[in-house]
Each structure stands twice: as C-alpha cells, then as structure tokens.
Image: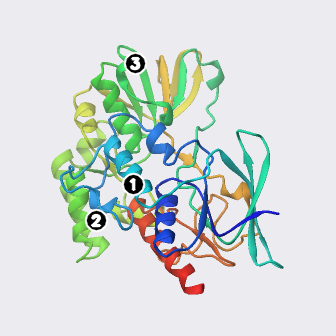
C-alpha cells in the first residue's frame, strides 16, 4: 500500500520549502520529495561563487520569515543559502532525498494522487499517495545545452553554467560564454576578473539595467503602469549605458518591448549589470554573434568569423521534465512544464493539482504561490 499524506510536494527548492512552511503553519501534513541529496541544490551546488541576489532581499524572502535586517540589500549566494538553512530548521522541513519521480497520476476512483518514485540509493520503486499534489520542481530543473554542429569534435572543455564556480581555474585561457542572460554576463565578468581571455555570444536583443534601476522600477510599479515604468527604465539605461547607436558598436541591441513587459509576458529577464558592460566597452570582453558550429578547437560564428577557444561555457538556461512524469493533466501545465492559465490564476489546476514557482516571477512569485496553495487546501479540509 502506498504511504499516504494529505499533500505531496515534488521539489525541495525555495518553492517547495515555501509550500512546506505554509502547509506546516496551517497544520496540514505533507511529504516533500527531492531528487538531489539536499534541498535548494541549485543554490547550494550549482551556482557560481560570486553570485548575489539580483533583486533586493525584500523581494526574495519566503513566507513567514524575513532576512536579517543587518544583511546587505543584495545578499550573497552564501547568505541566501544560510537563510534557506535557517528557514528549513525553523519550520522543521525534512525532505525525502534521492527520490526521482517516475510518474504522478490522479486516481479517479480514490480521488487521490499516486506518485511513484525511484529511490536512487536502493534502486527500488516507492509509491506515495495524497489528496493534493504540488509541483514545485522549479523553472530551472534540468540544464539545457543546445545542439551545436561539430561540438563532439571540440578539443577543449565544455561545461554548463551550473558546473562553473570561479574564474580562478581559467586564468589565461581563451573562454567562450554562450548565452547573454544574467548568468552568462556575470560569468563572463568573473572570468575576465581572473585573467581569462573572455568572449560572450550575444544573439538576441537585451535590456541592460543596474540593480538599483530594477529596485526603483519595482517600487514605481506600485503606483504607475508597466508602460510608463518601462519607458523610464529605457531612458535611464540609455543615459547610463549609451543609446542604441552606442551599444550597437559593441554588438548589442535593445528589444522593442520594455524590460518589465518582457519579464511579465515571456519571463525574459533584463540583464542586471554588475560590471560586464564596462568591460565590453573597454574591449576586455569580446561580444560575438550566434555560434554556428565547432571545428576542432575553433568556434565558427554567424557571418563566417572563427576563433580558437580552450573552454566553452553554455549559460543557455534550463528545461523542465514535468511533462515526462505528470500524467493526465491537460489543464495546468504545458509541454514545457509551465502554467497554461495566466497570472494570477496560474497556480491552481484540477483534482487537487497545484504548482508553485513556475510563473516566471522569481522568489517573490513563488512565495505568493505557496501561500495561495496552502490557504486553498485549508479551505477544503
């Protein structure tokens, strides 16, 4: 017989921890399953050393526990990990580790979710059942590396950004960063700080803002519309980083839509600059167009130019694997593992199915989801 709990949570990242804490405060029994050997594995094991929160700490706090007031506005990765450790201790969160979900299926006759997991230590299958199922496996669950023609011929080292820790080990090497999101930009900066000869592929238009600009924008959104805030942010960005003509000299262009519109509509974050743009302008970091193919130790780019590299780092984001194991849901999540319903109705499905932290609204959105889910379940008990 499967072990029963009222709620099964899949994933023990910040979203899963937040859901567990909110359920615990309402005395709702739950079980939390995690495929890694620790909670918040992306933060603990797969983030680079210099990482800081890109948003002010008040937008990154989980429900029912603030970060220490004496911490900086933008805490370090190490501080945020300490916060998560304290959070798990405070709410007595004890995930079941090394459990990879094989299937989650709703039993119509029993009106329960049956979840089959593989115990990665024993290799055995285990089954759990619950009236409610919370998908909290995150936006960033599986590292994604695009298929590049000839990558198997590359004579150097290839890694994903989740394997990158510090530029210390890449000093004096020719390193290519593929991907110009926040991770790619900050890794490029870190590499150059440690003396690597750094290049970065910037394939798509990007908005460039500072942390303080984003903080100001979030404050203004409480009072004025997205359109007004976006227009103001673009003006500030042009004043600080240069107009469209200026940045185009360095291989960078801006999107037509505003930064906050793109974030809400498509989940596309602006680049929050911590020094990379200055190094691009000074020529320390080279911007290159789309990577087309690899030929031995050479990378070939759109337009035909090629350059030799010792290391290629793919900062190309993540995919979700929910569609591989979640069975019978045709309402809540799409093939990419993201919600079909629009915000703010994205967190609740049918038959007791929920999702937390998948609305592409960061930690702040995950905290809102967790509270909504716990309150909705409580109302049904």
Residue 322 higher or lower than 298, as above or below: below
Can residue 46 be seen?
A: no
Label 2, on which residue?
Answer: 230
User: Viewer-nearest of labels 2 and 3?
Assistant: 3
* Quarter containing the N terminus: bottom right
Asked whether, in this view, residue 241 is left or right of residue 373, the answer is left
| Residue name at image x 44 percent, y 46 percent | 204
Spatial CA distance of label 1 from label 2 is: 13 Å
**Is 126 on the left-hand or right-hand side of 172?**
right
Q: CA distance from mark 3 to mark 1?
A: 27 Å
Give the mark toward the camera: 3 or 1. Answer: 3
Residue beneath disc 1: 269
Residue 112 location, x and y as percent? 74, 74
Mark 2 and mark 3 lie on one chain; the one further toward the N terminus is 3
Q: In the figure, is residue 338 to the left or right of 3?
A: left
**Camera-side residue of 203 and 352:** 352
First in sequence: mark 1 or mark 2?
Answer: 2
Figure quadrant of the C terminus: bottom right
């Amino acid at each position: 017989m499967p072990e029963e709990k009222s709620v099964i949570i899949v994933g023990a990242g910040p979203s899963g921890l937040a859901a567990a804490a909110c359920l615990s405060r309402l005395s709702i029994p739950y079980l939390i399953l995690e495929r890694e050997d620790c909670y918040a594995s992306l933060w603990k094991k797969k983030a680079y050393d210099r990482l800081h929160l890109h948003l002010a700490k008040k937008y990154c706090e989980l429900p029912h526990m603030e970060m220490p007031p004496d911490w900086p506005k933008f805490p370090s990765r190490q501080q945020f990990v300490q916060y998560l450790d304290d959070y798990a201790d405070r709410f007595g969160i004890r995930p079941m580790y090394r459990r990879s979900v094989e299937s989650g299926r709703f039993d119509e006759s029993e009106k329960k979710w049956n979840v089959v997991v593989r115990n990665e230590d024993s290799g055995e299958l285990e089954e759990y059942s619950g009236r409610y199922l919370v998908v909290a496996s995150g936006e960033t669950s599986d590292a994604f590396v695009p298929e590049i023609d000839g990558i198997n011929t590359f004579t150097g080292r290839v890694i994903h950004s989740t394997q990158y820790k510090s530029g210390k080990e890449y000093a004096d090497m020719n390193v290519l960063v593929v991907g110009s999101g926040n991770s790619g930009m900050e890794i490029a900066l870190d590499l150059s700080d440690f003396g690597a000869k750094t290049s970065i592929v910037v394939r798509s238009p990007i908005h460039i803002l500072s942390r303080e600009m984003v903080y100001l924008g979030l404050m203004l959104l409480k009072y004025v519309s997205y359109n007004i805030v976006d227009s103001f942010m673009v003006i500030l960005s042009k004043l600080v980083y240069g107009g469209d003509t200026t940045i185009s000299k360095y291989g960078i262009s801006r999107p037509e839509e505003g930064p906050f519109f793109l974030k809400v509509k498509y989940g596309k974050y602006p680049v929050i600059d911590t020094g990379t743009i200055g190094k691009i302008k000074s020529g320390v970091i080279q911007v290159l167009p789309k990577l087309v193919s690899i030929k031995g130790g050479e990378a070939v780019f759109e337009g035909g130019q090629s350059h030799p590299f010792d290391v290629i780092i793919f900062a190309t984001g993540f995919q979700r694997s929910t569609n591989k194991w979640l069975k019978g849901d045709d309402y809540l999540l799409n093939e990419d593992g993201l919600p079909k319903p629009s915000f703010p109705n994205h967190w609740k499905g049918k038959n007791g199915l929920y999702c937390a932290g998948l609305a592409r609204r960061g930690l702040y959105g995950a905290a809102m989801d967790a509270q909504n889910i716990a309150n909705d379940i409580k109302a049904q008990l």
